[in-house]
Amino acid sequence: MRQPENYSEIVKRENMARQMQFHFLYNTLSSIREVVLQDPEYASDLIYDFTVYLRACIRTMQNQELISVYQEMEYVRAYVNIEKMRMGKRLHVTYDLQSEDFKIVPLSIQPLVENAIRHGIFPKGLQGGNVSIKAETLAGCHIITVKDDGVGFDYQKVQDEVRRGERDSVGLDNTTSRLKQQCNADIVITSEIGTGTTVTILVPI
């Protein structure tokens, strides 16, 4: 059951919205401008995807009403399409959505996919890589898994750096906090350098 928001929660949500990566918005618009000159039809599709992504950001800024996984995946696909514009064939994304009707907070899967692409696949350069997104219901629990075969990282080392203030982990912290508060969900992260990262959201029924 959703808990009422106090003032600090509202401030946190507003701060999260302000943390939207403005350089991503600027770069996207600049890239679309270039595509318009070469392929107007493709540019039109990208503009649609961009508006879907912006709608999700605005919705998250205005309220935290739960949405279906189906709706969240619309935002995810829009974001992935934008990233594919830049990365081309280097980025491969697959979807295995066996269960899409349960509720989660908006922009909870998308940040995980963004992390997988930007911090997992993009650093591999021309080699590129794969991201898989899976949603299923097993043993009384809704499970969402975002997995990549990117560069991976030392999870414990990163957590230690965050605690010492040497690294910013606000994005994932916000996602974890919102899922916990509103869905009583947990996030499990496993990663291995050179192999990739798996992030699993567990939402109790």
Image: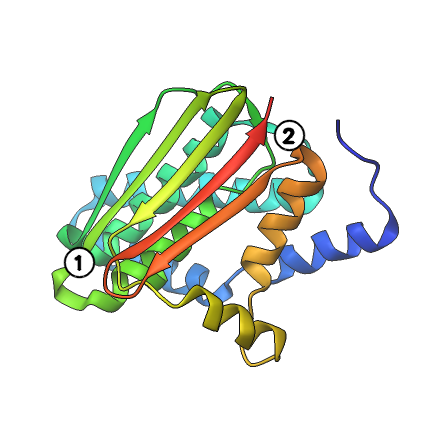
Query: Where is residue 5 drawn, in percent x and y?
Result: 82, 42
Rendered image: mark on residue 66: 2
Q: Name the residue located 51 percent from the left edge and 26 percent from the top edge.
A: 142
- How many numbered discs? 2
Q: Amino acid at mark 2?
A: Leu
Q: Nearer the viewer, residue 82 or 155?
A: 155
- Structural crowding at the residue carrying mark 1, measured as other residues with C-alpha within 10 Å and reported as few (<14), some (14–19) or many (≥20): some
Q: Name the residue located 66 percent from the left edge and 42 percent from the top edge.
A: 180
Q: Nearer the viewer, residue 20 or 197?
A: 197
Q: Nearer the viewer, residue 48 or 191?
A: 191
- Structural crowding at the residue carrying mark 2, measured as other residues with C-alpha within 10 Å and reported as few (<14), some (14–19) or many (≥20): some
Task: Label 1: state its secondary structure.
Answer: loop
Q: CA distance from mark 2 to mark 1?
A: 34 Å
Rendered image: mark on residue 128: 1
Query: Where is residue 73 drawn, in percent x and y?
Result: 42, 32
Which quadrant holds the N terminus?
top right
Residue 51 to residue 114: above or below: above
Residue 139, visible in the rendered structure: yes
Classify residue 155 as left or right of residue 196. right
Which quadrant holds the C terminus?
top right
